[in-house]
């Protein structure tokens, strides 16, 4: 792997591994869900490797309006 490729990959890894789950957890704590959906969403984000991406796909449909 060349140095240029490595410099392009590192920011994406940082976003997906560190920043996206933190943003998802903050969004879960700020939002209102029905029943125990907030706990379920937190567990998905924390314990599933790509849980933050899954949350941003499924989460908005589960929020109270």
Image (cartoon, grey):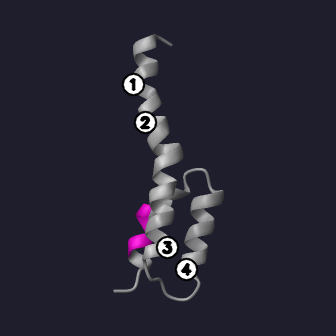
Secondary element type, mark 1: helix
Question: Which residue appears farthest toward the left when viewing the image?
Answer: 65
Q: Earlier in the sequence, mark 3 or mark 1?
A: 1
Q: Which residue is mark 4?
A: 37
Q: Earlier in the sequence, mark 3 or mark 4?
A: 3
Do residues under tags 1 and 2 come within 8 Å of each other at their CB atoms? yes
Q: Which residue is mark 3?
A: 29
Looking at the image, which residue is at 60% across and 74% down?
Answer: 40
Between residues 23 and 64, which one lies in front from this camera angle?
23
Q: Which residue is mark 2?
A: 12
Q: Quadrant of residue 56?
A: bottom left
Magenta segment range? 56-60
Categorize mark 2 by other alpha carbons within 10 Å: few (<14), some (14-19), many (20+).
few
The CA span between labels 1 and 4 is: 36 Å
The CA span between labels 2 and 4 is: 29 Å
Q: Earlier in the sequence, mark 2 or mark 3?
A: 2
Q: Which residue is mark 1?
A: 8
Secondary element type, mark 2: helix
The CA span between labels 1 and 2 is: 7 Å
The CA span between labels 2 and 3 is: 25 Å
Do residues under tags 3 and 4 come within 8 Å of each other at their CB atoms? no
Between residues 10 and 60, which one lies in front from this camera angle?
10
Categorize mark 3 by other alpha carbons within 10 Å: few (<14), some (14-19), many (20+).
few
Categorize mark 4 by other alpha carbons within 10 Å: few (<14), some (14-19), many (20+).
some
């Amino acid at each position: 792997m060349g140095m240029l490729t490595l410099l392009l990959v590192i920011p994406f890894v940082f976003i997906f591994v560190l920043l996206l789950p933190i943003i998802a957890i903050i969004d879960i704590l700020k939002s209102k869900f029905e029943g125990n959906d907030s706990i379920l969403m937190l567990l998905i984000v924390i314990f599933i490797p790509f849980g933050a991406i899954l949350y941003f796909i499924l989460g908005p449909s589960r929020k109270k309006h």
